[in-house]
Image: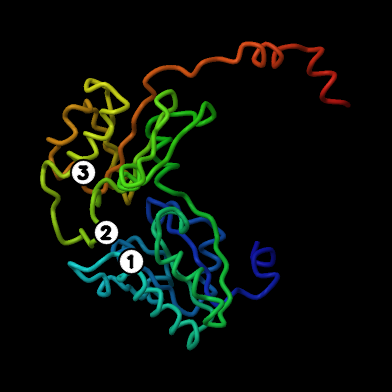
């Protein structure tokens, strides 16, 4: 496996993901990459737990959480973190940025690195990992083949995006809904989701059932799935909002294209379109 991954030298910056449960979700590929990097930069504080960190990795981890300043725009915090990673790469290459979950799913540090690496004269490669979307689907035992919508909760409202009510929907980042500022050191007020509720009522009835889902960061904890109706969204306990996503089941089934669906079961149609 090592030969397959490192047939060519690692880039200056490897962007990898921890998955959701750490260290259980680390892939063999990610572990091998981290073993060959000089330093591993992250902003996830739970990755510093020596008890759960794979042998040899703990000493390499350099946490950037101290740069996550309160009362500052999140994008400015992430930009500052990316600059530290650039500076480190010039001195210590190869290094890794270890994101929580999948490194390209709602991770602004990754985006800053991608955008700025060429100007910095640095090479970058991104590697896949398990995201919260994967774990949410597992927790709900939901098959995504019939369709799935995924939105940032604030962007749904901010850009007047209209969800299809005949397809299930996941809203992420509800614990930071309605603000671009750092919320890590604050607790949301009970009615912080009121604008989201008002917006969703344009498409769904007030009694439509939703699910608040939180994914555990280790095997010591379990996933929490809390059913609520849309009418209750703005009166939800703030503790249930923190770190959660919102799953919205479809309101009704999509309209079937019977002609096409019939052809899918037609053997002659199959034989005519798929040759041996």
Element type at marker 2? loop
Residue that lies at the very extreme toward the right in this rendered image: 276
Q: Which residue is mark 3?
A: 241
Question: Local crowd at mark 3 within 10 Å, few (<14), some, or many (≥20)?
Answer: many
Please identify the quarter of the rendering in which residue 214 is found. Answer: top left
Question: Local crowd at mark 1 within 10 Å, few (<14), some, or many (≥20)?
Answer: some
Mark 2 or mark 1: name the one nearer the start of the chain: 1
Residue that lies at the very extreme toward the bottom in this rendered image: 91
Query: Does residue 270 appear to the left or right of 16 in the view shown?
Result: right
Q: Which residue is mark 1?
A: 75
> How many numbered tags mark residues here?
3
Residue at the image point whose x is 16% and y is 45% from the top: 192
Quadrant, the N terminus: bottom right
Residue at the image point whose x is 40% and y is 17% from the top: 252
Q: Nearer the viewer, mark 3 or mark 2?
A: 2
Instruction: In this rendered view, identify the residue nearer to me: 176 or 243.
Output: 176
Mark 3 or mark 1: name the one nearer the start of the chain: 1
- State the separation of the CA atoms marked 2 and 1: 8 Å
The circle drawn on residue 180 is 2
Find residue 10 and report its horizontal and vertical position in percent. Answer: 61, 74
- State the separation of the CA atoms marked 3 and 2: 17 Å
Mark 3 or mark 2: name the one nearer the start of the chain: 2
Please identify the quarter of the rendering in which residue 76 is found. Answer: bottom left
Instruction: In this rendered view, identify the residue nearer to me: 239 or 72.
Output: 72
Find residue 211 and report its horizontal and vertical position in percent. Answer: 28, 31
Find residue 20 and report its horizontal and vertical position in percent. Answer: 38, 51
């Amino acid at each position: 496996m090592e030969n397959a991954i490192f047939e060519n030298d690692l880039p200056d910056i490897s962007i990898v993901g921890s998955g959701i449960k750490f260290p259980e979700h680390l892939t063999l590929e990610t572990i091998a990459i981290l073993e060959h990097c000089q330093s591993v930069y992250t902003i996830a504080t739970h990755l510093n737990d020596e008890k759960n960190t794979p042998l040899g990795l703990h000493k390499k981890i350099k946490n950037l959480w101290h740069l996550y300043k309160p009362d500052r725009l999140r994008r400015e915090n992430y930009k500052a973190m990316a600059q530290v990673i650039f500076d480190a790469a010039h001195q210590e290459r190869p290094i890794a940025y270890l994101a929580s979950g999948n490194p390209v799913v709602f991770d602004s540090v990754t985006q800053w690195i991608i955008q700025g690496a060429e100007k910095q004269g640095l090479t970058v490669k991104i590697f896949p990992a398990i995201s919260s979307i994967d774990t949410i689907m597992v927790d709900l035992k939901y098959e995504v083949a019939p369709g799935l919508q995924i939105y940032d909760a604030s962007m749904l409202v901010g850009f007047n995006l209209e969800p299809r009510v005949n397809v299930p929907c996941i809203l992420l980042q509800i614990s930071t809904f309605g603000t671009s500022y750092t919320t890590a050191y604050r607790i949301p007020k009970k009615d912080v989701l009121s604008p989201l509720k008002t917006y969703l009522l344009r498409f769904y009835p007030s009694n439509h059932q939703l699910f608040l889902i939180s994914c555990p960061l280790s095997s010591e904890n379990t996933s929490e799935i809390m059913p609520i109706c849309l009418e209750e969204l703005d009166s939800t306990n703030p503790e249930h909002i923190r770190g959660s996503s919102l799953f919205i089941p479809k309101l009704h089934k999509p309209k079937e294209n019977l002609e096409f669906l019939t052809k899918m079961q037609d053997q002659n149609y199959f034989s005519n379109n798929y040759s041996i």
